[in-house]
Amino acid sequence: GCDPDGENKSPDEAAVAVKSVLEAVGVPLIVWGCGDNDKDNEVLPQCSEISAGERSLFGSITEDNYKTLVALCKADGHKLIADFVLGRQGNKLV
């Protein structure tokens, strides 16, 4: 729903959706970006913050967003979904 070429929902709307699903299911989530790095860098930090401590999986990291995602997942207690090469880069930062 957050893709700028689609519904273009705001980071606040995405965070509310994440919180709502977490409350409904009570297990960690897989939170996946829309694929637009600029939008993902706005949306995913709010989703991470609102679900801090829930040990969710965030992805997918790319060369353009891995620094942001590594930092927020480390701060909020989440894990990352990455391809092998970017996973190695991310591990060096953790």
Image: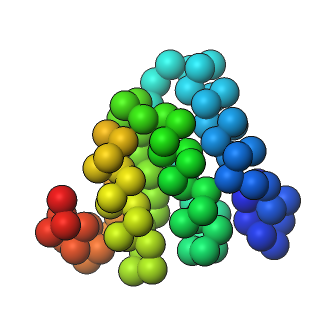
The percent coordinates of residue 7 (x first, y second) are 85, 59
The percent coordinates of residue 6 (x first, y second) are 83, 65
Horizontal relation, residue 57 to residue 26: left or right: left
* Image point (70%, 46%), residue name: 12
Q: Above or below — where is 20 with respect to 26?
A: below
Horizontal relation, residue 57 to residue 29: left or right: left
* Image point (44%, 51%), residue name: 58
Horizontal relation, residue 86 to residue 26: left or right: left
Residue at the limit of the structure toward the left, as seen here = 92
Horizontal relation, residue 54 to residue 44: left or right: left
> Closest to the observer: 59 or 68?
68
The percent coordinates of residue 76 (x first, y second) are 36, 42
Identify the image quadrant of the C terminus.
bottom left
Residue at the limit of the structure toward the right, as seen here = 7
Q: How many tags in the picture?
A: 0
Residue 92 visible? The answer is yes
> Closest to the observer: 16 or 1?
16
* Image point (74%, 45%), residue name: 13
* Image point (19%, 67%), residue name: 93
